[in-house]
Structures are given as C-alpha cells and as structure tokens.
Amino acid sequence: MALAKSAKSEYGTVDIKAHGIPALVEYSYTLLDESVRDTFVAYQKQSVKLKIDTAKKISIGYAGAVAAAAFQPFPIADAPIMVAIQVVMMAHITACFGFDPSLLKFKSILTGLGGPFAAALVGRTLVSLLKFIPGLGTAAGGAINAAVGGGITIALANVYIAVLSSITERNGEFDEQTIIDELNKAMNNVDMDAAKKEWEESKGKYSEAEADDILKKAKDSLG
C-alpha cells in the first residue's frame, strides 16, 4: 500500500502505515533486463537494501580484478593498479546509490584513510616483497597478494557501502568531507580477517571476463 490511511470500524479508527513498496521495487528489479538494472537501482529511492545488495555484488568483481593484479611479474607493481581499481569501484558504488561520483576525489579519499585499512595496505606492500625471495617467486607472492588484496578491497567496499547507506537512510549531506569523516570513523571497526574470509567465500561469484576487463582498464589508466 503506497499511502498511509485511516480505517474506521466498530472498534474505532485504525491508522494503517504505508507498506510493501520496497518489496515491490525489489521484485520489479528481478523482472528487468540486465542492461537497465543498474540504472533502476540508482534512481529508485524506496529500497536501500536493493542498493546495498547490488553494490556488494559489484564489489566482488573489483576484488577479483585486484586479485588478478597480484600476479604481476615485478614486486610492488600491483599497488598502483589496486588503487586505480578501487577508485573506479568507489565511483561505481557511488552511482549505485544515486549520488554523483564527480563530486568526490576518490584517490584523495583513499590516500587519506587511516586505521586498520592503512595498516592492511602496509602489510600488502610487505607481502609484495615476497616476490623477491628465491624459492617463492612471483606465483607464491602473487597467491598471497591475491588473498590480501581481495580482502582489502572487500573491506573497503563494505565500509563505503555502509557509509552511503547511512547517508541515504537519514537523507544526510553528501560531500567529500562528510565521506572522509564517516569513512575514517567506520574504519575503526574494520575486521580484516572477516573481510578476507568473505573474499574467499565470494570466489566464483563474479565473471572472470569482467574482472579481466576492469584490470585492463586500470592498467590503461596508468599508462
């Protein structure tokens, strides 16, 4: 029922709240062609859950691209690629929530993050050095990097989705400083182990072709 109403009965007047619209929107989504689903999700305002679910699905493909980037032939070479992929992921998630991605400088936001996320990035760089160790080589270092990089990307996506969900639900301000403040606050509660586990469980839930395409575009953007 789209509109609230009052109903009279022999027992008095009963106020009936509007209900069912989010469920209708979510069901409508399942009937749409793949080519228009993202646009529908962005513009609909009734179901935050649909935005969250779609954004989480999107993030898995980007985590897959970061994992693929881990198998670079030279140490540290995958770090800027990871950032490039995460920047595009954040822009995609922003659009998913119906906000204008051009209003934010995602690379600046990423480099300004502290707490557990920054510590994880440092750890990831150290892991990349394993490619220098004789007997381990690119394959071993890359395998570890894939798990760590995928987990970091999932963690970033989850926190960013939570921040945008909160802003959407309370009709809050959407600006760069608000995003930075809320992300830094949320980062204090990041569980990197849980994020890595979530990434491991997400494998096979994304298109490898899509991940490869994301990785290729990230490489091209870096020249």
Image (tube, helix red, strand yellow):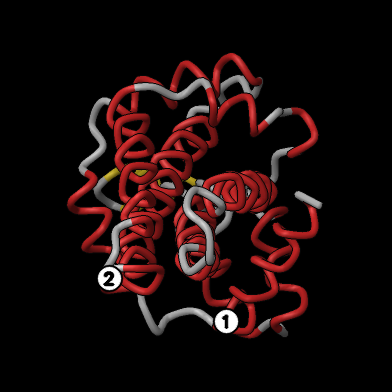
Viewer-closest of 52 and 142: 142
Residue 77 to residue 184: above or below: below
Residue at the image point whose x is 39% and y is 40% from the top: 159
The disc at residue 162 is none
Q: Position of residue 54 (x, y in %)?
A: 53, 64
Residue at the image point whose x is 63% and y is 76% from the top: 212
Looking at the picture, which amino acid does disc 2 mark? Glu
SS of the residue under disc 2: helix
How many tags in the picture?
A: 2
Residue at the image point whose x is 40% and y is 55% from the top: 149
Q: Read off the residue under disc 2.
A: 200
In the rendered structure, the answer to whether residue 135 lies left or right of residue 214 reads left
Looking at the picture, which amino acid does disc 1 mark? Thr
Residue 209 to residue 217: above or below: below
Lower sequence index among marks 2 and 1: 1
Q: Position of residue 15 (x, y in %)?
A: 39, 43
Q: Read off the residue under disc 1.
A: 30
SS of the residue under disc 1: helix
In the rendered structure, the answer to whether residue 122 lies left or right of residue 196 reads right
In the rendered structure, the answer to whether residue 220 lies left or right of residue 96 reads right
Viewer-closest of 81 and 7: 81
